[in-house]
Amino acid sequence: MNNFSIAIHGGAGTLVKGMMTAELEAAYTLGLKLALEAGYSVLENGGTSINAVEKAVTILEDSHLFNAGKGAVFTADETHEMDAAIMDGKTLNAGAVSLITGIKNPISLAKDVMEKSEHVFLAGEGAMQFAKMNDYTIEDTSYFYDELRHKQWLEIKDTDSFQLDHSTKKDSKFGTVGAVACDTKGNIAAATSTGGMTNKKFGRVGDSPMIGAGNYANNKTCAISCTGSGEFFIRGVVAYDVACLMEHKDLSLEVAANEVIHKRILEIGGDGGLIAVDKNGNIAMPFNTEGMYRAFKTSNGKEEISIYK
Ligand code: ASP
């Protein structure tokens, strides 16, 4: 049996240390723990990495603390437009959705695109049509409402700014969510889900649903889920870049992931982080921001839940 492991993140845009209360820190830690345990128990029971990452991400989506599903940030039109992607490292099958509204668990819709359609990426109205065809309930906007997110939006609405996923801002309570896992058979998978950026407009799509940018999995190399300034992560093709460094330069997971987050993405002006796993269950979780909500658990007894460096 292969070593198995799972890593999750709740975004690299953490509250700056001074703004974090003990109560909030406990809530984030609990949110991460619930998702981690749920994903890990899928693996422990012999389940696949793809089911484990879906499970962990749905739990993060169901928590209002993280910017995905419930608690997603507001767009310029005071709506929620969500993006998600999932990829299976064994088959290289992938599914992604973008600009969807009213879907409680975007990651499950992405998985259905992978499993029940001939396509990889569905967006906007078409993705919504596909959801309805597959009997998804369309939730009312009130389901996604979070008071703090609304306050963040009120502060910048009617301006041209949209809030990047920086941890340097006082109030940057953002965060895409994601999970990567390696199962007992050594198959790996990645899942990422996000509300994107506060006050986004023009149908803006970030890196999260783009295969190779914010999410990627290939048994040959690694499974990756990213969080950070999406425009830069798209241009850096970050998730695939880590896989390429491993494949073509023969770098280890950790060295490749560090090279991308601490060097290559910084060189083009991006900030954020990623979680990564390889087929031996090794994990890396580099970030170049002040913090990243993150956790991992392995079958050889290692476990960690942390927020700051
Ligand atoms: N990368 C996400 C996006 O650009 C944001 C985030 O990670 O918080 O949509």
Image (cartoon, helix red, strand yellow):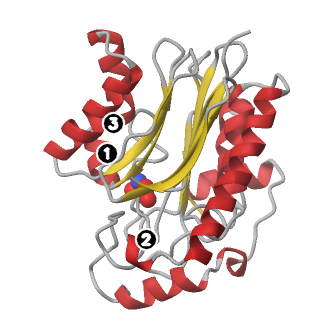
User: Which residue is identified by label 1?
Assistant: 233
The residue depicted at 31 percent of the width and 45 percent of the height is 233
Q: x%, y% of residue 259?
A: 25, 31
The quarter of the picture where residue 120 lies is: top right
Q: Which mark is residue 15?
A: 2
Cβ of mark 3 under 8 Å from ligand 1: the answer is: no
Left or right of 223, for residue 269: left
Give the SS element for disc 3. helix
Give the SS element for disc 2. loop
Q: x%, y% of residue 8?
A: 58, 44
Q: What residue type is labelled 3?
A: Val
Q: Do the residues labelled 1 and 3 touch (CB within 8 Å)?
A: yes
| First of labels 3, 2 by sequence position | 2
Residue closest to the far left: 267
Q: Against 198, is 46 above or below?
A: above
Cβ of mark 1 under 8 Å from ligand 1: the answer is: yes
Instruction: Please tell me which residue lies in front, 179 or 15.
Output: 15
Query: CA separation, marks 1 and 3?
Result: 5 Å
